[in-house]
Amino acid sequence: MEINPPKLKNYQQAIIDSPARFTITEAATKTGKSFSHLWWLFSESLFPPKEGANYWWLSPVYSQAEVMFNRLKLDLIQSGGFRINESKLFIQNSNGGCIFFKSAENPETLYGDDVYAAVFDEFTRAKEEAWVALRTTLTATKGKCKLIGNVKGKKNWGHILAEKAKHGEPGYEYFKITAYDAINEGLLDSEEIAQAKRDMSEDAFKELYLAEALDDQANPFGIQHIQACLKPLSDNEPEVFGVDLAKSVDWTVVIGLDLNGDVCLFERWQSDWSQTRAKLIQIIGSKPAFIDSTGVGNPVVEEIQKVCFCAEGYTFTQISKQQIMEGLAYAIQNRYISVLQGGINDKHVMQDELEAFEYEFTRTGVRYRATEGYHDDTVCALALAFHKFKDKPAPPILSFHR
């Protein structure tokens, strides 16, 4: 069997050639990290120490493992001499080396085998228990393992392991790949990365494109950016509204944005659902609005929609809240939106709540919340208002850039 090796980029080749038993690579997205590691694992499997030696590609979820299986299968199917099992996701060569593509979703299923080499793809997005299980499979064989993934906070077990490798842990070597490394190697386009930087928040760009770990509990907007957006209440008419409905001891908050994205209406109160519904109908009228419809808010939104035809419900989940808060962070950091200053009529709470808001990296993703002792009603209402504002067709004279 004759296999022509691909031409790897310099940083890819450096990782492949590392003599360390374990390599830890924190990399920007779309830098070719998975492709080069797939080639390495395939190369290892071509010269197994014995018939039926196992090699593993481990991904956080099954669908990702399947993608990599198909990628290797398509590259090899023309070569012949391989046994390919679609149902069990393995590829075996004529020398007996067998690559299994596995999911890290249930770590208990990973114990038992002897593995001669492995790749743990997107390891920072998987459970630490999966790494523990994978590590046991390499014990008897003294097999090598390469871990690759994006950065996901400083408390992530993967980043902690990377820090150990960076500081000289025996048997480990650390690598870091940024988007600019990939640009220098001709793998990514500089204009595309510049656009990505404009399209997302600073924190998201730093982690996904610069491989820089951020504090797990930090303000997603940036205190200096919040203060740069401080403006008094606009005198213009509202174009869109964002509404966060009261839950338990929270407040109902309504924020209106004018055609420039400036806050022109701010209302905050606590009352029963009947009074809240009537007041919201009066404020919103026929204007577009996003209203938090999570949980008990759903029937209230349905009643409001019978009168306010342009009102829509928005359900907060961990994923949807992350998306909408990243949108608000982008707006604040680029000054596409204003933040109320001053303390009259409780309007200072907008700045207070924004500055007290934080995010935390967890094993299930990013969690956005108010610092203990604070509310986040105003933050949620402002995020909903901007989410509606950015989707509303703008007049020709309107420009986000100020």
Image (cartoon, rainbow, N blue to C red):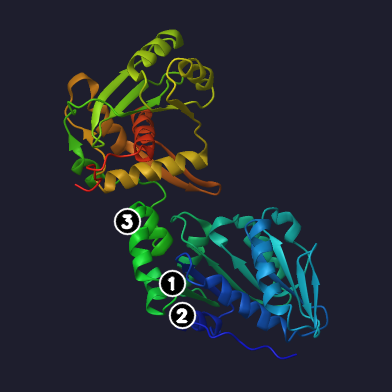
Above or below: residue 187 compared with residue 313: below
Whether residue 212 is visible, yes or no, is yes
Whether residue 142 is visible, yes or no, is no
Q: Which residue is mark 2?
A: 11
Q: Which residue is mark 1?
A: 177
SS at circle 2: helix
Question: What amino acid does circle 3 point to?
Answer: Arg
Q: Which residue is mark 3?
A: 198
Residue at 42 percent of width and 72 percent of height: 188
What distance separates the C-alpha of mark 3 from that of mark 2?
26 Å
Please give left or right for residue 110 compared with residue 22 in the image. Answer: right
Q: Where is residue 31 shown, x and y percent of the image?
A: 47, 71
Above or below: residue 213 compared with residue 228: below
Mark 1 crowdedness (10 Å alpha carbons): few <14, some 14-19, many ≥20: many
> Which callout, 3 or 2, points to the residue nearer the camera?
3
Please give left or right for residue 64 compared with residue 184 in the image. Answer: right
Question: Is disc 3 in contact with disc 1, using a CB cutoff of under 8 Å?
Answer: no
Question: Is disc 1 in contact with disc 2, using a CB cutoff of under 8 Å?
Answer: yes
Question: What amino acid does circle 1 point to?
Answer: Ile
Closer-to-camera residue (402/185): 402
SS at circle 3: helix
Lower sequence index among marks 3 and 1: 1
